[in-house]
Amino acid sequence: MTTICADVDEAVADVADGSVVLIGGFGMAGMPVQLIDALIRQGATDLTVVSNNAGNGDTGLAALLARGRVRKMICSFPRQADSHVFDGLYRAGRIELELVPQGTLAERMRAAGAGIGGFFSPTGVGTQLAAGKETREIDGRHYVLEAPLRGDVALIGAHRADRMGNLVYRKTARNFGPVMATAATTVVAQVVQVVETGELDPEAVVTPSIYVDRVVAA
Amino acid sequence: MTLSKAEMAALVARDIPAGSFVNLGIGQPTMVADHLDAGHGVVLHTENGMLNMGPAPAADEVDPDLTNAGKQPVTELAGAAYFDSAASFAMMRGGHLDVCVLGAFQVSAGGDLANWHTGAPDAIPAVGGAMDLATGAKSVFVMMTLFAKDGSPKLVPTCTYPLTGVGCVDRVYTEVAVFDLTPEGVVVRETFGTTTPEQLADALDLPLRLR
């Protein structure tokens, strides 16, 4: 049963200290900025955040990092022209970084959401990012064993939801939203608009309601 | 005389087979798009979840929900499709992409690629989709200068920077020559201006074969 929240503060009210939080978005496209702002107000700290990047500029994820709420980032591409908040924390030794190839990051969450206990990927074989991991040769090709990656909470951005919690996305703002929606205990979607059940074309639904716990228009 | 970045991009575009599904890495490879002939039906893939990506929009048509891998605004062409990140990388890893074009710090004669991390103690590493692309695309083209700023060659016997992928690079485009990396060794495919294969052989610590 999906709850339609009155506001973003209600939607993140129970996020616990020490949580693993999956945050959607590729750069700012698809990033649920209002949910992150609510999480800052809510005060949860000692978080592990999983997101493709490590914040852009001073808003959204960068603002959460700047408040010192994040103990560890798991991401593929922290270093960008406007990642000064993360850069400063990392160079000061105030944040831990687990760097994961982008496809492996997505697939590890897909595996978690699909009940898969791990998978052998060719990506990263022979590199630092596969160091210490089990490898296997399958049909003449080399693979590295990767583990599922599950969150306590997922905060994602989508375009529209119906009152059951079915989600549709918009253009490349979709990115990590659908896979994160499958991989967390509590999934919260920030949308532009909540419509009545029946108003979304069932053929066009990308994230079915079974994955979605809370929806908030913001 | 050496090739400009735009001339290198045009050269890469010329060598991409008609109808290919292609991913252009961030930075210099993005320029290849400007030289693709629309009639050749090349479909551009962007790792953040789109096929048949179009060029940058006019200033008044920028859509924050429509960006490329470099987070720059782009447009959609007729026949475009959107998908999530897991599907986007399954396309790469699953061998569905025909060509990717990447930048590099170093490429080894055996096709090893180093392009994600200098390994310097104060450097912040960032890998993005580079390892997935290098490993997954059927053909991996590199665009880079042949020499680093300190004059050292970037086409080397063995990479000293951390690897992105092992034995994955097929061809290297530089401002002075194009090289094919083959099981038989490094082949000089073409040279530009006054550069001769003999000069390249002197400058590089590598055995070179002529085409």
Image (cartoon, coloured by chain):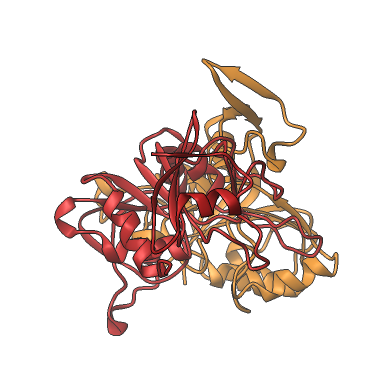
Chain colours: A orange, B red
Image quarter of the N terminus of chain B = bottom left
Judging depth in this view, the residue of A28 and B203 nearest the camera is B203
**Which x, y percent locates residue A121?**
57, 31
The image quadrant where one finds the C terminus of chain B is top left
Residue B5 placement (x, y as % from top left) = 41, 68
**Is residue A58 in sight in this rendering?**
yes
Q: Residue furthest bottom?
A: B60
Residue at 25% x, 44% y is B17
Within the image, what quadrant is residue A43 found in? bottom right
Q: Is residue A192 visible?
A: no
Identity of the residue furthest to the front in this view: B198
Seen from this angle, which residue lies furthest top? A139
Comparing B165 with B182, the one in front is B182
Q: Quadrant of residue B210?
A: top left
To which quarter of the image does residue A59 belong?
A: bottom right
Q: Is residue A117 left or right of residue B34?
A: right
Percent of width and height locating residue A210: 45, 41
> In this view, which residue lies farthest toward the right?
A93
> What residue appears at the point 84 percent right and 66 percent down from the top-left corner?
A94
